[in-house]
Amino acid sequence: MKHFHRPKQTESVADELFEYKSVEKKKLKISIAITLITMLVEIVGGFLTNSLALISDAGHMFTHLFALSVSTAAIACANRPVCHHRTFGFYRIEILAAHLNSLFIFAVTIWIFIEGVQRIIHPKQVIGMEMFIIAFIGLVVNLVTAWILHGATKESLNIKSAFVHMLADTLSSVAIVIGAIIIYFTKWNIIDPVISIVITFFIAAWGWGLFRDSANILLEAAPKGMDTDQIRKVLLEEINEIEEISDLHVWEITSKMYSMTAHVKIKGDEKCVDVKKILSRIKQIVNEKFDIEHTTIELD
């Protein structure tokens, strides 16, 4: 048996991720400051206008603030150096943060839904104009924060978890602005809790997607869109010296950091083939075609 490992490239990937996550952290801190101020405005405004929709949006913005804070802390922990008993470092903390955020989303969604039903049964008068002004401020803040976080969502599930909160906040703000206009002109106070309940379904749907993606990574499932059978097929087609590939496993350490292990059986006598060349070719193919940076191969 022979083993192949790629420590140098792994360290390079880690360095790139460290630099990238420093930018992520700055974006998150700016978003935290903006969100905290807006949340306090919505809480005060919600009670002054007697609007459940505003209070619900403030509660959802609190989950967003919580998500941003956890995401920032996760990046700080993930950047801690590798140690002897945590050989992959602390990258997985980011995924735990995303998973925790999804659970928190579900909890707040349930609360908003129950409160909305109670408001439908026992309606309360809502002040439409003030509700509109505060909701509009919240909408502008959501759009600004979404713009700040947008560039990082494709690379980090952790940032995506915060961005999901932001999208839900933006949608709820739009709904509340429209609802405030309707309430102002029609005095239909029931619109307020109805909007709140509708918002919960969208939030729950996004939360489920986040829960599913983070759970798959924690369960070390193959990365989304990556098929191990396809990897095996490509290697067998492009490297004639390979007879068989078994025990092929691919998993995601953290967002966009993939690892692979496999047993590879070489045709004929191992002494008659260039083993180093075959190993080099394997890692090149999986890197270029599947973005897998860390490989461990056993030759049979």
Image (cartoon, rainbow, N blue to C red):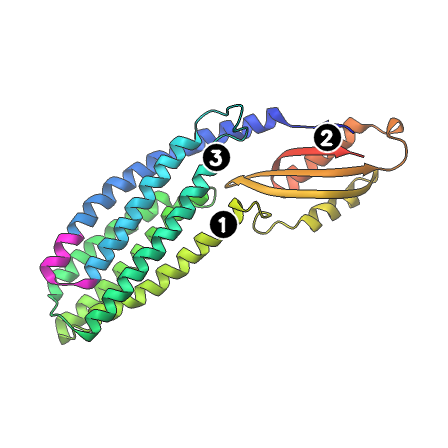
Disc 2/disc 1 C-alpha distance (Å): 33 Å
The earlier-in-sequence mark between 3 and 1 is: 3
Observer able to see residue 152 = no
In the rendered structure, does residue 48 fall within the stretch colored magenta? yes
Name which residue type carries label 3: Tyr
Alpha carbons under labels 3 and 1: distance apart? 15 Å
Q: Which of marks 2 and 3 is nearer the N terminus?
A: 3
Pick whichever, 152 or 70, lies toward us: 70
Q: Mark 3 points at which residue?
A: 91
Q: Mark 2–mark 1 contact, CB under 8 Å?
A: no
Q: Name the residue under label 1.
A: 215
Q: Is residue 27 left or right of residue 118?
A: right
Give SS at disc 3: loop
Q: What element carries label 2?
A: helix
Q: Residue at x 21, y 73 (%)?
A: 120
Q: In the rendering, at what x and y percent does residue 155 appear?
A: 47, 42
Q: In which quarter of the image is the N terminus?
A: top right
Q: Give the range drawn in magenta.
A: 42-52
